[in-house]
Amino acid sequence: MVNKVLIANRGEIAIRVMRACREMGIPSVAVYSEADKEALFAKYADEAYCIGPPPATQSYLNIQKVIEVARASGADAIHPGYGFLAENPKFARACEENGIKFIGPSSRVLELMGDKVMARREMTKAGVPVVPGTDECVAEFGEARKIANEIGYPVIIKPSGGGGGIGMTIVANEGELAKALDSTQAIATTTFGLCDVYIEKYLSNPRHIEFQILGDSKGNAIHLGERECSIQRRHQKLIEESPSAAVTPEMRAKMGEVAANGARFVGYEGAGTMEFLFSGGRFYFLEVNARVQVEHPVTEMVTGVDIVKEQIRIASGLPLSIKQEDIRMNGSAIECRINAEDPLNDFVPTPGKIKSYHSPGGTGIRVDSGVYASYTIPPFYDPMISKLIVWGRNRNEAITRMRRALYEYIIVGIKNNIPFHKAVMENPRFMKGELGTHFIDNETTLIEDMKRIMEQEKPLEEKLSHLFEEKKRIAAISAVAAVTQMYHQRQTRQ
Ligand code: MV4
């Protein structure tokens, strides 16, 4: 087993990794920027070192500095979390060259999966169905026109070095093609340093369904079922669930096997995600996310597998602790990402001081966060406050439990998207499981529903804000009781 793990990340995911380390008896090392001196993760670690100024480029993205702290502290492994250096092959290679175990796939696999055209080609070879499109980069207009005519409009042009939606352009007809090719190539060059782009058939309002995979150094690869992440806004996922309401046990078994085969084919070591679009009853491979993901807890809730512990075991050269036939999907889990953003003002980030804080609890609730009452969320990083994850015996129970939990959740001081989540949990199409990647745009009443909910809570909030200043602790508890009671009254009136 590895002896000491440095976590090259911040916030809730840093704590998530340290919790796994602690349960495994492995000391943890935090690295933090000057903006994160007071952050919970820096206190939670066994050791913590400041690595630079607030901007990530001068701290969390500074490969040299992170490696230096790992060596100085005697850490023999680095967990990169998600974002920052997590899928950077140069960082994985720097670890490899310094005799430090990178907790994730090899630099070779990161390189392969980072190039989306290459990933498509490899997965096709492994028998994974991909979206109809090119298996080479498209350099000039004549070529693009020929391909687009073959697969039929609409098409989508994507940067090969990209992923996550940045720079993608939808093309409705040949008249739009030249301009779209130019602009995608420009973004590909400026953002990813590679002018390569590729073309796919554009699927309208597909569901975003991804499979969790685990591969070890012995050549074993298994899947932990799927997550549905269709509810997203501007390529930011907001709500994720497992299992998907659209996937039958037979489809899960088949697609899971296909995903695990893809992982085995490339020699995938660690935890990863195979993203698919699901449309017309069929799956189409999009890309591999070669890291632990924000939404991994919904999979942990339904399978009982600790994904981060498996990552650490795999990096230590141990085989997977579970076999495919041991994996059972039990019940249903939903995650809401609680963000510091103003849902009434185009979801602009609202970092700042959390004056009072009371998170929900009870049966089937998990809250992964890196915040506490009186903590100030710095403006330099992504504005996620926490992840609220619930488990239920079935999807309906998970939804009613999520509603209950959202009404218990009290965050005073900064605007946040809890009202938005409350509106989604009451949305008839959400309740029926009728989802698609354009859900938020299509559900035009969501913002009004949210305003109605906020209006109903207003008198209560005003009353409570006084209480919070005077008797913080007792008020928090009374707030929970009062708001929850108000919610139940509304439910029974309907
Ligand atoms: C697509 C697609 C439709 N057809 N690919 C967005 C995130 C990234 N992982 C893949 N994405 C998409 N890929 C094909 N062939 C639809 C999306 C997509 C999207 C694309 C452009 C603008 C907004 C979008 C919102 C959701 C999904």
Image: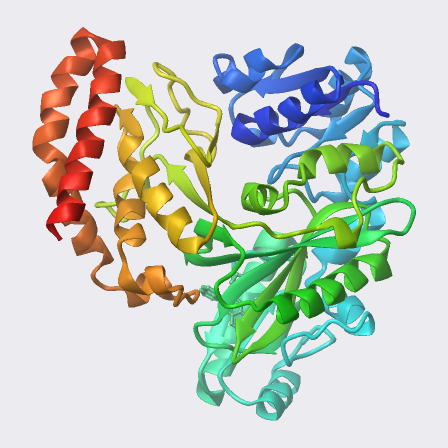
Instruction: Tell which of 94 and 325 is nearer to you.
Output: 325
Q: Residue furthest top?
A: 470
**Residue 11 seen in this snapshot:** yes
Q: Is residue 341 visible?
A: no
Q: What color scheme is it? A: rainbow
Where residue 151 appears, x then y in whole percent? 60, 88
Q: Is residue 45 left or right of residue 241?
A: right
Percent x, y for residue 175?
A: 45, 87
Is 457 in front, or is 382?
Answer: 457
Quarter of the image with the N terminus is top right
Q: Residue at left 21%, top 23%? A: 479
Residue at 89%, 32% in the rendered image: 97
Image vertical order of residue 458 relative to residue 158, above or below: above
Q: Position of residue 301 (x, y in %)?
A: 56, 42
The residue that appears at 62% across and 83% down in the rendered structure is: 144
How many numbered marks does the figure carry?
A: 0
Residue 102 position by quadrant: top right
Q: Is residue 80 above or below residue 161?
A: above
As drawn, is 254 to the left or to the right of 473? Answer: right
Q: In the figure, is residue 37 to the left or right of 290?
A: left
Q: Residue 67: x, y in percent? A: 77, 24
Q: Is residue 321 left or right of residue 187?
A: right
Foreground: 290 or 174? 290
Q: Quadrant of residue 428?
A: bottom left
Near-viewer residue (382 or 58): 382
